[in-house]
Image (cartoon, rainbow, N blue to C red):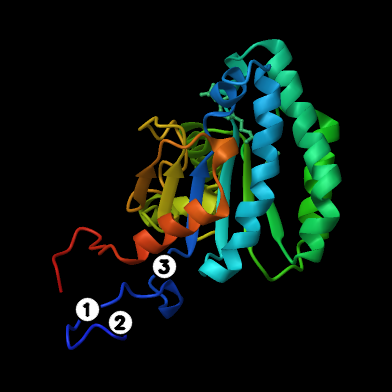
Amino acid sequence: MRVPGTKGVDRVMPKPIREGNGPRHVAIIMDGNGRWAQRRGRPRLFGHHAGAKRVREIVEACPDLGVRYVTIFAFSTENWRRTQSEVAGLMSLFRRYITKEARALFEENVRVRFIGDRVRLDKKLVSLMDELEFMTSGCTGVNLTIAINYGGRDEVARATRRLAQDVAAGKLDPDAVNEETLPKYLDTCVLPDPDLVIRTSGEARISNFLLWQSAYAEYEFIDTLWPDFCAEEFGRLVTAYGNRERRYGGVKA
Ligand code: FPP
């Protein structure tokens, strides 16, 4: 594509992502809610509530950007170490979020899934998660995956345990275990690997998020605190990804 009116200078425009070079799957570490609230002299939960409001804007931006899958890190296996009141507040926020957003997500054709270990979550929350997954199971638009009580190492350990059980039961030949077999036991077994991982709030860590799946992902660590992250900035990062060259360990074509 040429830029019109550049008097013979063949300036090449960045390729629009709709040509298929944008990320199909974007994973997001939503960090910075606590600091966002602190800067306003408010309790940390105020920041989490503001952060939850941002999720819809990002999901709604996906179709136009060509993003088919978006996976968000809402609560890690390490987050139980926070104060009891923050943990309880987050769990209550998840329950309220699911109850309040279910209809809108369904009407917007969003397919919702949850990843993470549900065993430690309270029964009411788990039943709301199950209901929302069931309710949106026929939706064919954006795939929104919410990670709650999720840790990459924990996921690989749980997957390995189930794989070992299948081996012990004679259902799986140990010689058949390879890079294609193991992901079938991961929570993300039906999802493609993320192409782009975004972390907000200026921290350059991956904090145990999608460890196996992000082996070849591109990363964006940005300073914006999650409650300030908007569709416009998301769009910029998605477009920037479209202009990168991914080689998966190979060499330039
Ligand atoms: C990290 O920020 C954020 C979390 C541990 C919770 C993320 C949850 C939300 C964005 C809201 C809920 C989402 C849904 C889908 C309902 P932090 O508290 O560690 O921030 P800090 O580093 O500034 O302290």
Residue holding disc 1: 11
Distance Cα–Cα, label 2 vs label 3: 21 Å
The structure residue drawn at horizontal position 39% and vertical position 52%, both measured from the top left corner, is 177
Establish whether ligand 1 lies closer than 8 Å to the Cβ of label 3: no
Q: How far across and how far down the image is residue 125, in percent?
A: 80, 35
Q: How far across and how far down the image is residue 10, in percent?
A: 19, 83
Mark sitting on residue 171? none
Residue 114 visible in the snapshot = no
Q: The residue tagged with tag 3: helix, strand or loop?
A: loop
Residue holding disc 3: 22
Distance Cα–Cα, label 1 vs label 2: 6 Å
Q: Is the residue under label 2 in contact with that under label 1 (CB below 8 Å)?
A: yes
Sequence-wise, the earlier of marks 1 and 2 is: 2
Image-quadrant location for residue 179: bottom left
Q: The residue tagged with tag 1: helix, strand or loop?
A: loop
Image-quadrant location for residue 89: top right
Sequence-wise, the earlier of marks 3 and 1 is: 1
